[in-house]
Amino acid sequence: MHRDQLSQNGHDFIDDAYISSLINNTKEDGQRVREVIAKSKEKTPLSVEDTAVLLAAESPELVEEIFAAARQLKCDVYGNRIVLFAPLYIGNYCVNDCAYCSFRRSNPDALRRTLNQDELVNQVETLQDKGHKRLILVFGEHPRYDASFIADTVKSVYSVKKEHGEIRRVNINAAPLDFAGYRKVQKAGIGTYQIFMETYHHSTYRKMHPADTFKGDYLWRLDGLNRAFEAGCDDVGIGALFGLYDWRFDVLGLVTHSLFLQDRYGVGPHTISFPRLRPAHGIEMQNDYMVNDYDFKRLVAILRLAVPYTGMILTAREKPALRHEIMGFGVSQIDAGSRIELGGYTEAGDAQTQVAENEQFELGDLRSLDVVMRQLLDDGYLPSFCTACYRVGRTGEHFMEFAIPGFIERFCTPNGLLTLTEYLYDYASDETQAAGERLIENELHKIHDEHMKDRVRQRIEQIKKSDKRDFYF
Ligand code: SAM
Ligand code: SF4
């Protein structure tokens, strides 16, 4: 099945034979691993060949060196901030038949539903009441979820304002669009448009996605973010679903994709996601490629080193203890308090269980936002709801966040502190508030510029004492 027009010179740039040969022929070599680590410490994106060198490192000491380098790079490039968001499932009708997903059309037990306007508003208000400011809207692929529907949903979400609550950034995870579609959603003010390739390995892709479905068209999906760029959406996210094929192959697929976008459009992806396959209702998959926790940590650390300036998203598919550990490896965004059943934020609330028929898959972390915030604060992370860059136009090729020395100190830390302050005084429990106050004091001490420190302090006081919100630098 083939649809509409591809991007300029749109072609299949994934060479399975080359990627497989790199995996098979690159042998462990401690000296080369250290040379590649040294390159990544210079914050240069790694080539596919260099990344393969890291993937070939098996001995525990070398893997430990990779972990240590990833931790260091995360500190140097991102500091201690972690950005928080929540997913909002809008509709689970789907014309595709992905082997791993309970929304697949051949699953008769899935309860199909699309949020109506009132339900949407209720979900968003409930998310606002928890303190969320950033959402990702998730859609099945279906004619009813066309670009106009997505754009209207985005506008509705932005228009909901309850007390101090508002959603300041709406990202999208949905099917690839055509040019006109991307232009439409861009006009609605979306943040990142995410499309996961699931697996870059062609024959596995064919096995997972039947040929008579839209998603069965590999090239249409691979080309999806090229069309986004050419239609003016320069803020895109890529991802692979780990567990479908050899994780090493898909790490190299992600790196190839990232370098391709960087080369062609002058900007790499804004984010990389690495969801790991979870059990899902009505899905029985036989496969040999499940990724264990240790290899999962390796893949996250290696991706961190390979794409130093790309945001990395770790989702609530993973269990709290592992999330906690992996966060130190270079993750920049996590979701928290997530519900992935339709209507879940009002109907399931903070329940620590899921109802299988309503869900796309099982989550590993059902803790509330407040509990996750407290743990982050106790561990010395600065949880941030900042949306400043995108709102002042610092995106795409203008998104110089990490290239400008001192950027974190001038923008990210102050904005993180201000959005954290909003959270603490508008939504947090007493314990979380106390943990947050301690962290804020520590962070203020670290700001060298006295003038900036005073400005942040003044604004923190304004948030505490008045109804003024949404300060940012
Ligand atoms: N329907 C759109 C699509 O497929 O691109 C977008 C949203 S889909 C609901 C979001 C992502 O969930 C998919 O891209 C896939 O990577 C992930 N997913 C699907 N089934 C999963 C499972 N059983 N475990 C973990 N992640 C899964
Ligand atoms: Fe549909 Fe997306 Fe699930 Fe595939 S992954 S069945 S396209 S919702």
Image: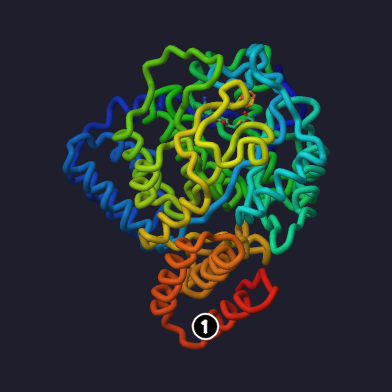
Task: Tell me where residue 403 appears, x and y as whole percent.
Answer: 48, 65
Residue nearer the viewer, 310 or 139: 139
Above-or-below relation of 263 to 469: above
Query: What residue lies at 52% left-to-right and 21% top-to-bottom?
Result: 280
For label 1, the SS is: helix
Check the image and name the residue furthest to the front.
430
Q: Where is mark 1, residue-wise?
A: 452
Quadrant of residue 9 within the rendered picture: top right
User: Where's residue 242, x and y in %?
Assistant: 44, 29
x and y, in percent, of residue 425 in the image: 58, 68
Q: Examine the rendered structure and indicate whether residue 157 appears above or below residue 166.
A: above
**Residue appearing at x 27%, y 47% in the figure:** 66
Specify how the rendered protein is coloured.
rainbow
- Image quarter where the N terminus lies is top right
Tell me what residue is drawn at x 69 percent, y 74 percent. 468
Q: Which quadrant does ligand 1 occupy?
A: top right
The residue located at (52%, 38%) in the rendering is: 257
Task: Give the x, y percent position of residue 433.
Answer: 49, 65
Side (left or right) of 417 relative to 323: right
The C terminus sits in image quarter: bottom right
Q: Left of 152 or right of it: where is 398?
A: left
Q: Taking the image as drawn, is residue 77 in sight?
A: no
> Is residue 215 depicted above or below 231 in this figure?
above
Kindly identify the amino acid type of the residue bearing the numbered disc 1.
Met
Q: Is residue 248 left or right of residue 149?
A: left
